[in-house]
């Protein structure tokens, strides 16, 4: 980190921003030094995105000042932000899939006074940028053919090509595998040694522990604290973000398993799912994990009837079911909260009540007409029970935070009174406070006798929530962990990379 005598690379003081009916930021401050990783934390709605959009020139602040290297800076457009040496890497990449890595890096920087683009010169420069980052990527590879992690590196190279000295990373690991996360953190460390200041936004606190020098926390649009990471325990970070003390990151769960609710036997589909067998007991939370591509989601889709199985059987409470469609599975008492709630779990343009009612229309239909009052009363009951934060029942689903969207998806399945509930990445993109509430709901469902299958890529989540853990690799179950309190992430990774079934 730069010496204290030097002015900060970036300083934002007293930043305020209001939108109609909402005070998004109130006197927020942020300081970033050269060669530092500053973690910016807060729940969804805390003001992180607004602050970053001000820094990126997408929003103009109402009050406050911004300095770079101690000199006042006026950032009133994305171009001005770029000229000031700021690179913003959003969660949704700003790349053109049909262009090469080289073309994406230098898009908009082509010489204006020549009739041709110096392709070889750009390719050589792109290679040097990748070498600087410490990653080898073919500059002439199409971006659509690159992995998500490689596309992330292209975004970083693009910022460096524009001489960025301040790089903001917004949830950079949301779609990465654990191995790719390790690679990205290595890149961040390399950039830090080159004097670049990095603002790192993530809900994954293990990454913050691994990479951050200091932590700035926002809550409800206000600055709560800025502390050295070495002085801030994990529980303290959570308490600062949510504004209340949480006894633990994961609620405690006293599992009292009942009879077998779901039995999966020799389930197969091509090379994606191969001879998978396991059982779920009433009142039990079973974690299903493995590396990306292990076959976890594919297994859930077969159980739910979203895909056709080649072989195998599924039994519910001892009775075989042949779910050839999600409708069959839902009627039998099996529900799935999909990994991508926005495209598969919700109709974003419809209201929250309409989303709740979609799979429950039969319950609320009389004489061919939907009883909207009955639907509204049922939804209101679950909104209160689950503490879903909505303005009213007519609020569009797209306007909710990630945590509240997930609760609406869960509410519609609770109305079905399903016996088996499959959660696929239930807390992806959700802040730590909302995560805790989702965890509590999952535990309550288990306490009510539901059988829970929870798919997650986050190993701390799997270890913190599961009564048993099933691990997959290359479409097969490679092991089962029954003594979860004594298990470690290393134990899971050994099974996740195993070639043949193992006993844990």
Image: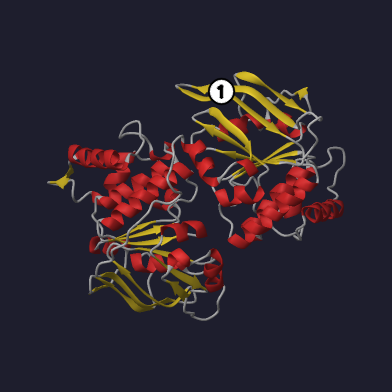
Identify which residue is drawn at 81% across, 46% down: 194
Residue 481: x and y, percent? Answer: 44, 71
- Residue lying farthest bottom? 500
- Residue lying farthest left? 367
Question: Is residue 209 left or right of 257 when viewed as pictured?
Answer: right
Residue 302: x and y, percent? Answer: 38, 69
Q: Which residue is mark 1?
A: 17
Question: Is residue 484 left or right of 28 when viewed as pictured?
Answer: left
Answer yes or no: is residue 328 visible: yes
Q: Nearer the viewer, residue 47 or 412?
A: 47
Identify which residue is drawn at 63% across, 27% down: 29
Q: Is residue 283 above or below residue 89?
A: below
Q: Nearer the viewer, residue 244 or 274?
A: 244
Q: Nearer the viewer, residue 120 or 448?
A: 448
Look at the numbered disc 1 and give the secondary structure of its residue.
strand
Residue 479: x and y, percent? Answer: 47, 75
- Indicate the quadrant where residue 480 lies: bottom left
Answer yes or no: is residue 348 visible: no
Q: Is residue 174 above or below residue 200?
A: below
- Residue lying farthest top? 63
- Indicate the quadrant where residue 138 lies: bottom right
Residue 59: x and y, percent? Answer: 60, 27
Tag 1: Cα neighbours inside 10 Å, few (<14), some, or many (≥20)?
many
Identify which residue is drawn at 49% across, 67% down: 487
Quarter of the image where the N terminus is located = top right
Identify which residue is drawn at 73% across, 50% down: 189
């Amino acid at each position: 980190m730069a010496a204290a005598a030097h002015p900060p690379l970036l300083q934002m003081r007293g930043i305020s921003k209001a939108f109609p009916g909402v005070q998004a930021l109130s006197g927020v401050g942020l300081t970033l030094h050269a060669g530092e990783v500053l973690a910016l934390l807060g729940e969804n709605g805390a003001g992180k995105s607004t602050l970053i959009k001000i820094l990126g020139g997408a929003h103009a602040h109402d009050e406050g000042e911004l300095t770079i290297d101690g000199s006042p800076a006026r950032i009133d457009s994305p171009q001005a932000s770029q000229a000031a040496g700021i690179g913003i890497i959003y969660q949704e990449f700003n790349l053109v899939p049909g262009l090469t890595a080289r073309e994406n890096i230098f898009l908009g920087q082509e010489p204006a006074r020549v009739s041709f683009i110096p392709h070889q010169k750009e390719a050589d420069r792109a290679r040097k940028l990748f070498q600087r980052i410490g990653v080898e990527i073919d500059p002439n590879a199409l971006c659509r053919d690159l992995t998500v992690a490689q596309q992330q590196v292209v975004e970083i190279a693009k910022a460096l090509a524009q001489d960025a000295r301040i790089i903001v990373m917004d949830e950079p690991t949301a779609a990465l595998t654990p191995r790719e996360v390790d690679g990205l953190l290595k890149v961040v460390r390399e950039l830090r040694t080159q004097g670049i200041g990095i603002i790192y936004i993530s809900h994954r606190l293990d990454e913050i522990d691994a990479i951050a020098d200091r932590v700035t926390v926002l809550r409800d649009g206000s600055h709560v604290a800025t502390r050295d990471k070495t002085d801030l325990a994990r529980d303290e970070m959570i308490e600062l973000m949510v504004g209340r003390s949480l006894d633990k990151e994961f609620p405690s769960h006293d599992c009292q398993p009942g009879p077998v609710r779901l039995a999966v036997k020799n389930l197969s589909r091509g090379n994606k799912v191969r001879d998978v067998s396991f059982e779920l007991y009433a009142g039990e939370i079973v974690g299903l994990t493995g590396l990306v591509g292990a076959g976890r989601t594919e297994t859930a889709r077969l159980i739910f009837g979203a895909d056709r199985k080649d072989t195998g059987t599924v039994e519910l409470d001892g009775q075989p079911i042949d779910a050839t469609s999600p409708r069959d599975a839902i009627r039998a008492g099996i529900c799935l909260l999909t990994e991508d709630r926005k495209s598969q779990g919700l109709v974003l343009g419809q209201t929250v009540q309409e989303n709740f009612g979609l799979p429950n229309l039969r319950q609320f239909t009389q004489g061919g007409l939907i009883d909207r009052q009955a639907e509204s009363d049922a939804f209101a009951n679950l909104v209160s029970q689950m503490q879903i934060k909505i303005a009213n029942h007519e609020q569009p689903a797209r306007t909710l935070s990630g945590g509240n969207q997930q609760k609406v998806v869960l509410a519609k399945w609770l109305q079905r009174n399903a016996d088996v509930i499959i959660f696929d990445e239930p807390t992806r993109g959700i802040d730590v406070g909302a995560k805790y509430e989702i965890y509590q709901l999952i535990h309550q469902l288990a306490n009510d006798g539901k059988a829970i299958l929870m798919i997650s890529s986050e190993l701390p989540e799997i270890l913190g929530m599961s009564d048993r853990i099933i691990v997959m690799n290359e479409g097969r179950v490679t092991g089962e962990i029954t003594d979860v309190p004594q298990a470690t992430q290393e134990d899971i990774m050994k099974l996740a990379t195993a070639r043949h079934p193992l006993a844990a």
